[in-house]
Amino acid sequence: MLSRKVIFRRAECCASGRSTLSRRASCGSDLVAGALAIGLWAVVPKCPVCVAAHVALWTGVGLSFAAASYLRWSLLGLCAVMLVYAGCRMIALVKHNA
């Protein structure tokens, strides 16, 4: 009876490790995503009527009050998801580098 040895090897990209430049680029893109989310969160109008006015001003499309309200909450939700994603990526990078 012949026995087989299974040898696990790391892929070339993992064996050499990530370069400092790629880590910095990844960290930089996470910071940009977080800054974009915070900036968008601060700029989103607080009332649906203002959201409808901004959409009409920039695109020429009229929105109802309900549609503007859904759009506003969708933008705020997207910002929250981006912030959570950027935070989780930063935590994962810190744990990976430690």
Image (cartoon, rainbow, N blue to C red):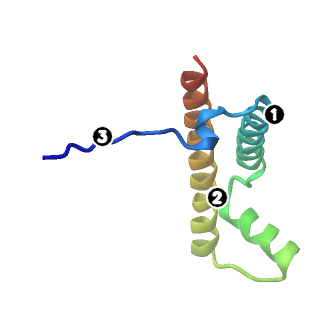
Q: CA distance from mark 3 to mark 1?
A: 37 Å
Q: In the displayed structure, does residue 40 sit left or right of residue 9?
A: right
Q: In the displayed structure, does residue 38 sit left or right of residue 66?
A: right
Percent position (x, y) of residue 11? Answer: 56, 43
Mark 1 and mark 3 in contact (Cβ < 8 Å)? no
**What residue type is disc 3 on?**
Lys
Q: Alpha-carbon neighbours of circle 3 within 10 Å: few (<14), some, or many (≥20)?
A: few
Determine the residue positioned at 66% across, 63% down.
48
Circle 2 sits on which residue?
A: 75
Circle 1 sits on which residue?
A: 21
Front residue (pair 58, 1): 1
First-in-chain label (2 vs 1)? 1
Circle 3 sits on which residue?
A: 5
Q: Nearer the viewer, mark 2 or mark 1?
A: 1
Percent position (x, y) of residue 38? Answer: 72, 41
**What residue type is disc 1 on?**
Leu
Q: CA distance from mark 3 to mark 2?
A: 54 Å
Determine the residue positioned at 59% across, 37% down.
14
Placement of the C terminus among the 4 image quadrants: top right
Determine the residue positioned at 56% across, 53% down.
77
